[in-house]
Image (tube, rainbow, N blue to C red):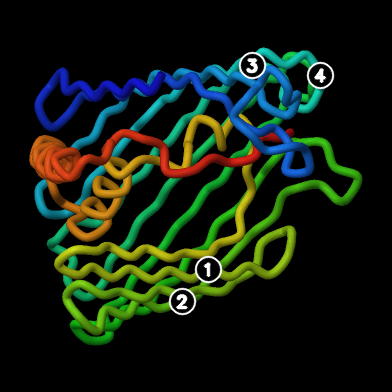
Amino acid sequence: LRALGDFEFVEDLLYLDTRANISQQAVSAFGPIGSNSSDNNNNQTLRSYSLSPYLRKKFGRQATGEARYTFSQQSSNGRDASLTDSTGNRVLLKLDSGPAFQDWGWGAAFTRDEFNYDSSPDTTFESVTGNLRYRINPRLFATGSIGYDKNDYFTTGKRPEGGFWTLGADWRPLRRTSLTASAGRRYFGTIYALGFQHTTRRTAWDISYQQNLTTSQAQFNQPVGSYRDFVEATLRSRVPNISDSALRDLVDVAAREYAAAGRDPDAIQGVNFQTN
C-alpha cells in the first residue's frame, strides 16, 4: 500500500497531509536481500501512517510562516529488537523571508521530534536554527546558519547537544543548473554538504551529500520517494513562492506524462535499511 492525501481546508491557510505505507523491506544491511519473506528472515512487513495538520500563511511580500504538527506510527511483524514498533510526535515552527527581500534573505526554524519505542529507549531531537543568504550577484549567493541542538538518546559519549554553524555558497551558472556547498561544525564533529541539480529536456539530475542525524522511525516515514515526490521537491526548491494548488497541478501534469510512458509515478524509487 502507498496512499497519500493532501487537503486544503482554508485557502492559503489550513492544510492536512496524510500518508500510509505497507511494504516489505530489508532490516539489516548484513542479512540476505530478497523479496521472498518465506525463506528470508531479514525481510519484514513494515506499516506506517502519519497525519500532519499545518498552518501556512504569507505575510504579503515580507515573509511566509508555517506551524506544523505531525503524528506518525510505525509497526512491523518482527519480534526482535532490531526494529521495534514506535510512535512519533513532531512540531515545526518556521518563518522565511519573502520576495520583498532581494539581496538579503533570512529564515528561522524550531523543530522538536519525540519518538517512543515499545522495546527501546525513547529519543528526543530538538533544534533551533537561524539562517542568512546574501546575493553577491544574480548567479552567486553566500549562505550561513547558526543554531543549537538539544537531543536526548542513548550514547556512551558526551551529552548530544551544543551549538552549530555553517558557511557556504549557492551558485547558479545556468537557469536549469545549480551547485550548493557548505561546511560547518556540530557537536558530533565537522559537517559538509554538497548539492547539484541540473535539468535537460528529457532528464533531471539531483545529486546530494549531507551529514545529519536520523532514526528508523524518521527514515521509514520519509522514504526515498517516488517520481511524483521528486518533481514536487524540485519545483518547490526552484519556485519557493509557488502556491500549493499550482504546485499540485504541475505535479499532476508531470505524473500523467510519466504514466503515459508506461511508468508508475507513485512507485518508491528505493528503500532504506531499517535499524535502531
The answer to whether marks 4 and 2 mark residues whose Cβ atoms lie closer than 8 Å is no
Of the image marks 2 and 3, the number of the one nearer the N terminus: 3
Q: Find numbered disc 1 in the image and state the secondary structure of the residue it sits on.
A: strand
Q: Residues within 10 Å of mark 1 (few under 14, many from 20)?
A: some
Query: Could you tell me how far apart the alpha carbons at marks 1 and 4 are, in whole angstroms?
Result: 35 Å
Residue named by callout 3: 76
Residue to which mark 4 is pinned: 80
| Image quadrant in which you'd find residue 164 | bottom right
Cα distance between the residues tagged 2 and 3? 40 Å
Q: Nearer the viewer, residue 164 or 265?
A: 265
Q: Residues within 10 Å of mark 3 (few under 14, many from 20)?
A: some
Residue at the spot of label 2? 168
Q: Secondary structure at mark 3?
A: strand
Which residue bears the numbered disc 1? Answer: 193
Residue 243 visible within the image: no
Q: Is residue 153 left or right of residue 239?
A: right
Residue type at mark 4?
A: Asp
Q: Residue at x 18, y 40 (%)?
A: 255
Closer to the observer: label 1 or label 3? 3
Q: Nearer the viewer, residue 144 or 190?
A: 190
* Residue type of the residue flagged with mark 3: Ser
Q: Residues within 10 Å of mark 2 (few under 14, many from 20)?
A: some
Of labels 2 and 3, the one closer to you = 3
Q: Nearer the viewer, mark 4 or mark 2?
A: 4
The CA distance from mark 4 to mark 3 is: 10 Å
